[in-house]
Amino acid sequence: MIKLLGKPTSINVRKVLWTLSEIGLPYEREDWGDGYRATNVPEFTALNPNAMVPVLIDGDFVLWESNSICRYLCGKAGRLDLLPVDPQARARVEQWMDWQATELNPSWRYAFMALVRKSPAFTDPAQIAASAAAWNRNVGILDQHLAAGGPFAAGEQFTLADILLGLSLNRWLMTPIDRPGYPAVTDYIERLLERPAYREFGRNGIP
């Protein structure tokens, strides 16, 4: 039985939960992280020295980093529709996975920590505004891409890239910032809402 360590409110844990739901692998989950069991204890850091969730345990195999976990699960389940084996098709999926991690996510950090988490370390109005603007610009890149291609990030088929992007877009919607009208992104979210796993793990309380 696969075991997943991490709290259900974590965006990176929900990424794995959505993937698990899509591929139908049985699993158990234990609550770890802020508000639950602390991750900075030897029991946990022996599994992940970064003291962060999620962590996946599959027998004697231990894996951390949520994107790597999702890739592993797709491979384990043989879900080539979610993560293709063809080099070009796979590269297209992983391009958007990497963009989500290296460009989209860093852009929203300051605004999200200030406006949703209310962290006292993130209170500079200029940096909040700059973060929100960068976040909107990046969502605009995705909107243009979807309008030109689509209906999903890597083309005609739903893939692992859409799981990551869907969660990030949910965070964009739940943060109180001014957002441009992005019709292709709006249509994309509606397509994602047709998937039960997105409604369960991706929406974070948004009806």
Image (cartoon, rainbow, N blue to C red):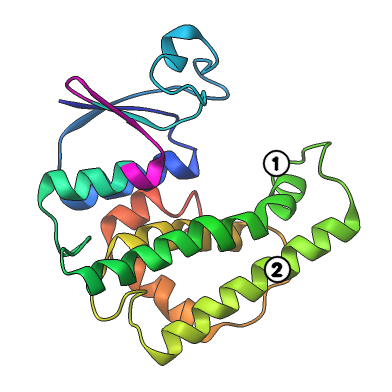
Q: Residue at x 56, y 82 (%)?
A: 182
| Mark in front: 1 vs 2 | 2
Identify residue type, mark 1.
Arg
Identify residue type, mark 2.
Ala
In this rendering, position of residue 177 left or right of residue 27 = right
Q: Is residue 149 above or below residue 91?
A: below
Which x, y percent locates residue 142?
A: 50, 77
**Label placed on residue 117:** 1
- The region drawn magenta spans 58-68
Q: Residues within 10 Å of mark 2 (few under 14, many from 20)?
A: some
Q: Residue at x 27, y 57 (%)?
A: 196
Tell me if I can see residue 193 in this picture: no
In this rendering, position of residue 45 left or right of residue 132 = left
Q: Is residue 174 above or below residue 41?
A: below
Please name the residue that numbered disc 2 is placed on.
Answer: 134
**Splitting the image into 4 quarters, where does residue 106 fall?**
bottom right
Which x, y percent locates residue 86?
A: 16, 69
